[in-house]
Image: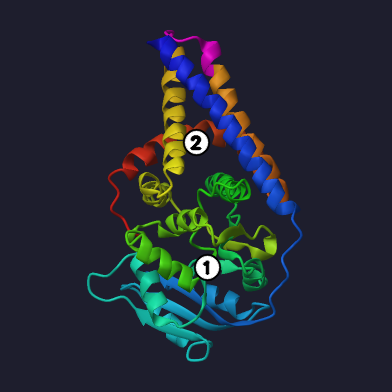
Amino acid sequence: MINLLGATAVALGVAYVLMALACRRGLLAIHEKPPAAAASSFQRASILIAAKNEEASIGRCLDALAQQTAPIGEIIVVNDQSSDATEEVVRSHRLYGASVRLVSTTGWSTGKSSAIRTGLDATSADIILVTDADCRQSPGWTSQMLGHLTEDVGFVAGPVLFEDDGSIFGRLQSLEFLGLVAVGAGSIGSGLPTICNSANLCYRKDVFEDESTRHPEIASLPGFDEALLQTIHARQDWRVAFAPGLDAAVYSDPAASLSDFLRQRIRWSSMAGRFPDRRIRIISIAVFLFYVLLLGLAAGALAGIVSAWLAIALVLTKASGDALILWPAARLYRREPLLRLFPLAALLQPFYIVFVSTMGLFATDRW
């Protein structure tokens, strides 16, 4: 039995490295493409911001959007039944009544997906940009995202990076999040889109509506942005793209506490089993099983019932796959100092991935 588990772990480890190589090639391919032509303005676009209890951050978000090099005619803030002063902060902002509108979810229609749906119903714009209330956008964000929305592209994802809060915990999150950005960009570049971040998206409203009709379950999923990415990719009439540059980046703060971090990751992991692309579900399961076997065989090595060399080989295999993605991503996004924490992050990641993936099976949190 131990031999079978060891052989399975080795096979999954090889597959893990091959997937990492594919993501690396896709990431580098996206960055080697000529930059998209910057858009100067796009009045047919609307920015949607879902907000719940964001009184401390929504003002900074609107300030950043006010400084965009490509002005957007409409910014819709969807207040999802906040219990703080989010609505008052929006109404007091200098853009309110000009380009900023405020709408609210009602009744039982709550949660981030419902908030975005409410915002979509409130706009007549053709192009939708989506960001989060606790984020700050680069001045060239709208220009770059719209520039990548060429005639044959229906969906554009962009990078989300964490600000440096000076703490070890915050920098570990930044490194882990950089890996997610690299996987998202690399998978799009390699032709098998897997993940994206709802804080930095751009898509055509009619494509969203069409996919919502064809796949009505999408709009109610907690991570419908990734489901939308995958279903659009599966079509023959639209492409998906990634806006890779720092000018397209959106910045956020790392989680302030371990409980906040785990709650967020559990909510994200709850989506993996509901991805519309079966291949992505299989990949997610394979990675989870690899981590479970890695931890189990490492524990067996400590107990003296499994070869220590096997455990060491698996740990090095996992670290090699991670390094293949993180090293170029750190260079491309000027995050090289974070790599000093790579050994610690590589050691901790399997524990938290197994934990949040398991807890994600029971998650009900919609924010």
- x and y, in percent, of residue 251 in the image: 58, 62
In this view, the residue in front, 162 or 223, is: 223
In this view, the residue in front, 326 or 56, is: 326
Question: Which of labels 1 and 2 is toward the front?
Answer: 1
Q: Is residue 96 left or right of residue 32?
A: left
Q: Which residue is drawn at the image coordinates 55% and 62% (left, top)?
A: 238
Cα distance in 3D space between marks 1 and 2 = 32 Å
Q: Is residue 334 left or right of residue 177?
A: right
- x and y, in percent, of residue 100 in the image: 49, 85
Q: Which residue is drawn at the image coordinates 44% and 10% (left, top)?
A: 3
Q: Which residue is mark 2?
A: 349
As drawn, the label of residue 358 is: none
Q: Which residue is drawn at the image coordinates 56% and 25% (left, top)?
A: 14
Q: Is residue 9 magenta?
A: no
Q: Which residue is mark 1?
A: 203
> Nearer the N terminus, badge 1 or badge 2?
1
* Residue type (three-letter) at the residue carrying disc 2: Gln
Q: Residue furthest front?
A: 236
Mark 2 falls on what kind of element?
A: helix
In this view, the residue in front, 160 or 299, is: 160
Q: In the image, is residue 347 above or below residue 256?
A: above
- x and y, in percent, of residue 339 in the image: 66, 40
Structural crowding at the residue carrying mark 2, measured as other residues with C-alpha within 10 Å and reported as few (<14), some (14–19) or many (≥20) = some
Mark 1 falls on what kind of element?
A: strand
Which stretch appears magenta? 303-311
